[in-house]
Image (cartoon, rainbow, N blue to C red):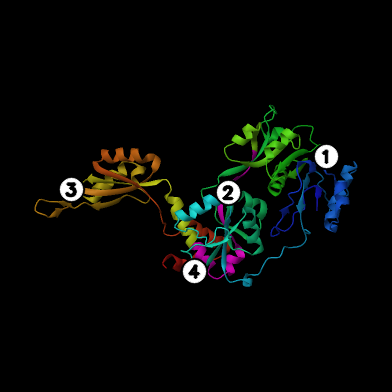
Amino acid sequence: VYCAVYGTRRRAPLSRAVTVDRTVDYHHHRITPSTMLASAPISSAARQSYAGARALEAGRRPARANGAFRARTMITASIRSTDGQKQAFRKPIESRNSIRMGIPSKGRMAEDTQALLSACQLPVKKLNPRQYAAEIPSVPGMEIWFQRATDVVRKILSGDIDVGIVGYDMLAEIGYGDDDLVIVHDALGFGGCHLAVAIPQAWDEINSMRELMALPKWGPARPLRVVTAYPNVAEKFFNDIGFEHVEISTADGALEAAPAMGAADCILDLVSSGTTLRENNLKEIEGGRVLDSQGVLVASREALLKREGLLEIVHELLERLEAHLRAQGLFMVTANVRGSSPEEVAKKLNSAGPLMRGLQGPTIAPVYTPQADGSSITGSFYAVSVTVPKSRIYETVKQMRTIGGSGVLTFPLTYVFDEEPPRWNALMTTLGLNAKDYEHLFRQ
């Protein structure tokens, strides 16, 4: 059903998936409320909003409903939707026994997801390249399902999968703040980008959202036309900043062409390096950065609380991910340092500055120096190990030498395991659970 709504768009329940009819292109942004009403049957709930839009089209003030009517923002999109009053069907937990994880099936996000899992010793094994089901041999009992990024979120909401990896931008657009969605890990370290408003470079006098909003030409008859693949996020953004006269339309791709074609005034799209914007004569503006995005691990709250074995698997995933991500960019520097005692060497290291103190303090151990008669003595050298960022290795080596260090070795770290993953405690709090009840997971 094609829809055009003036005023704040009436949002459907967040658990309901919204799919976009890809048959409509940019030219539909001029569809009017009259043609919308005539094109297809609509619900009684929606008819009131459409009636208000139609009144605006005719130049009349719409009737107030429940004491207020915001007749400002128009949403034009080709979105098939059920009645906003109805909750989408969510499969009950008992409908299946298996634990399912969804990951992206195509593109850079899919490649980065599998690379991260492999780096955490969680390689995905696919028996048939044409199949969408797979497994992680080191995590028995969990099915892996390859899905489009948007469908990972939708199928968590519908109860078809329990946990998944997806970009935060997709989570914000499809999940739309649904209470059942729980972010288990919010920074997986890949897919980094941000969602931003971009306008033509030819608008020399406009360099901020404040200046864009202040242009006198925007009004009910001539709203700011924005094309985006993120209508839900866009609507919330413009409402939050108080931009009253906005028309939002959706498109699949090549959004950067819309302003040049005259199909839109600006776009709201993902930006990585900004090269594509510049090559299409577009620019970002101050205050137009909507959200930052990267890969996240997300799960169903209901499944975490009720699906047997899921919390244990999520705990293992979280431990492996946290250990690998924390180790990225860290190197171990080891040297033999002269000293009469471990305490003396520790004092030297502490006086050399914070770089020589490692994660929780330097590790110091005696070096058993071999003698001519085959015996060994201690007390002349002590082996010292500290963990430092890769960018400060040479600085650390020089400091080791200043305190009598020699034979300096450096090597990258693969994992750094904490006593417990910090995000695990945060997850327990989010779920209303007592972390002490699950301490056995750290000792298994």
Query: In the rendered view, does 219 fall on the left or right side of 436?
Result: right
Disc number lying in front (4 or 1): 1
Q: Earlier in the sequence, mark 4 or mark 1?
A: 1
- State yes or no: discs 1 and 2 in contact (Cβ < 8 Å): no
As drawn, 301 above or below 205 = below
For label 4, the SS is helix
Looking at the picture, tell me which residue is in the foreground, 266 or 285: 266
Disc number lying in front (3 or 2): 2
What amino acid type is highlighted by mark number 4?
Asp
Looking at the picture, tell me which residue is in the foreground, 70 or 147: 147
For label 2, the SS is helix
Give the magenta range: 288-315
Which residue occupies 84% across, 38% down?
221
- State yes or no: discs 2 and 4 in contact (Cβ < 8 Å): no
Q: Earlier in the sequence, mark 1 or mark 2?
A: 2
Residue 107, which numbered label? 2
Residue denoted by label 1: 220
Residue 217 picture location, percent across and down: 79, 32
Residue denoted by label 4: 437
